[in-house]
Image (spheres, grey):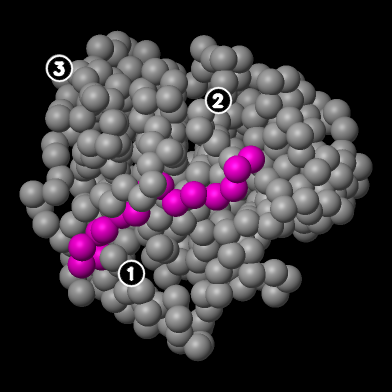
Amino acid sequence: MKKLFLLIVSLFTLACNNVGHKDPLRVSMPLDKQSTFLGVEEIISDIKILPLTYPESVLLSDDNMVKFNNNVILIIDRLHSKSIHIFNKDGSYRATIAAKGRGPGEYLDMASIQLLDNEIMVYSHLRQSVFFYDYDGKFVTQKELSHTPYNIYKTADGWWGYMGYGNGQMKERVVRMNHDGEITEKLHPTDANILSMMEIEDVFVPSENGLLLRETFSNGIYAFTHSGAKQIANFDFGKYSIPTNYYTQSSPMEAAEALLESDFATINQLFANKNIIAIYIECNTNSNPDNKFDSFAYGHENRWKNIKISRNDNLFYKTIKNLTEDDELVLLVEEGHINEFTEKFPQLTNFDKSKLSNRDKHHIVLCKLKH
């Protein structure tokens, strides 16, 4: 947890269908109370398993990201190999982008990855450039930007950029930029004294009501549109809520060290579609290290449901990756744990276990969420 904390101290937020609300929605979710949580059968109505087929040279792991559209599935290793593995929608392997380096078409880091209509975009903060590849993994073009935030999101008229906390350049955490990366607008100011660290998950998440940003430590929700920024929701995690004075400490390092010794929760992933917004919550439990858990929660029409995820749970712990337009939760699961789905939830799963190869492979699992 400490290593993860020092990687992800920063801002995110999410949005839902109530952008027009005058006041942000306050969601009470006391993670220290067992009555807060539901059983898996109370939130999931169906489980489908999509086997992935790929060569031995492709190595997938639980900390990979998953992105998809109607044509391809991307499984992304941002932390280790800096590679993007491309699959067809049926789970068959297509290609791999492995272009770490300093040459033409090569990136040093993968600060942002975006799946476009016909291309895959990789933003390298360290190279101050955006790289584009086709769905067969071939390099298409490279574009240098005048300004290079920590993370970016491409739009039809330019870019959104995430500056983080305490970046030393400006107090605003979000900027809008033109096609060349020149700043045209600064948004979301803060004077908080918080360490600025690298993000390991998406910062920006698109929705029908604008671009969403999840704020990890204040656990707030914001929507960004051409009209500006608006907070639309805020989560109260009870005992696990981060004290407000954390943001006003004169020494960010001392504040971070003190926080690491306490119990607190952070929103580490955000997903959204036209019906649902969902978050993955990581819980730090220093007061009771034997009770380590995370939580997954989702909201539909301002009604929220969540489950408790034990660190020993091979079914959901660190396997939740995305959300489809059909309200299916996307999991990336080792093949060895697929039997656990079929044995634990036989009424939800219709899968021929003879298809399993008993090899060290991963599969996509789709869990249909109940409204």
Which numbered disc, 1 or 2, marks the residue closer to the eye?
1
Please tell me whether residue 136 belongs to the stretch shown in magenta: no
Q: Earlier in the sequence, mark 1 or mark 2?
A: 2
Q: Residue 324: percent from the left, percent from the top?
A: 44, 24
- Is residue 106 visible in this depiction of the protein? no
Badge 1: residue crowd in 10 Å (few <14, some 14–19, many ≥20): many
Q: Nearer the viewer, residue 248 or 48?
A: 248
Q: Residue at x 85, y 28 (%)?
A: 140
Measure the alpha-carbon separation of dots 1 and 2. Answer: 33 Å
Tag 1: residue type?
Answer: Ile
Q: Amino acid at mark 3?
A: Gln
**Badge 2 element:** strand
Classify mark 3: helix, strand or loop.
loop
The N terminus - image quarter: bottom left
Instruction: Say which of 166 and 3 sits in front.
Output: 166
Q: Which residue is mark 2?
A: 68
Residue drawn at x 46%, y 63% is 4
Q: Alpha-carbon distance for marks 1 and 3?
A: 39 Å
Instruction: Identify the mark nearer the N-term, 3 or 2.
Output: 2
From the image, tell me which residue sits under label 3. 347
> In the picture provided, is 146 more to the left or to the right than 201?
right
What is the CA distance from the residue labelled 3 to the residue labelled 2?
Answer: 28 Å
- Tell me which amino acid carries mark 2: Phe
Q: Is residue 30 above or below residue 133?
A: below
Membership of 238 in magenta stretch: yes
Residue 354: percent from the left, percent from the top? 32, 12
Magenta-drawn segment: 226-240
Front-most of 264 and 335?
Answer: 264
Callout 2 crowding tier (Cα within 10 Å): few <14, some 14–19, many ≥20: some
**Tag 1 residue:** 242
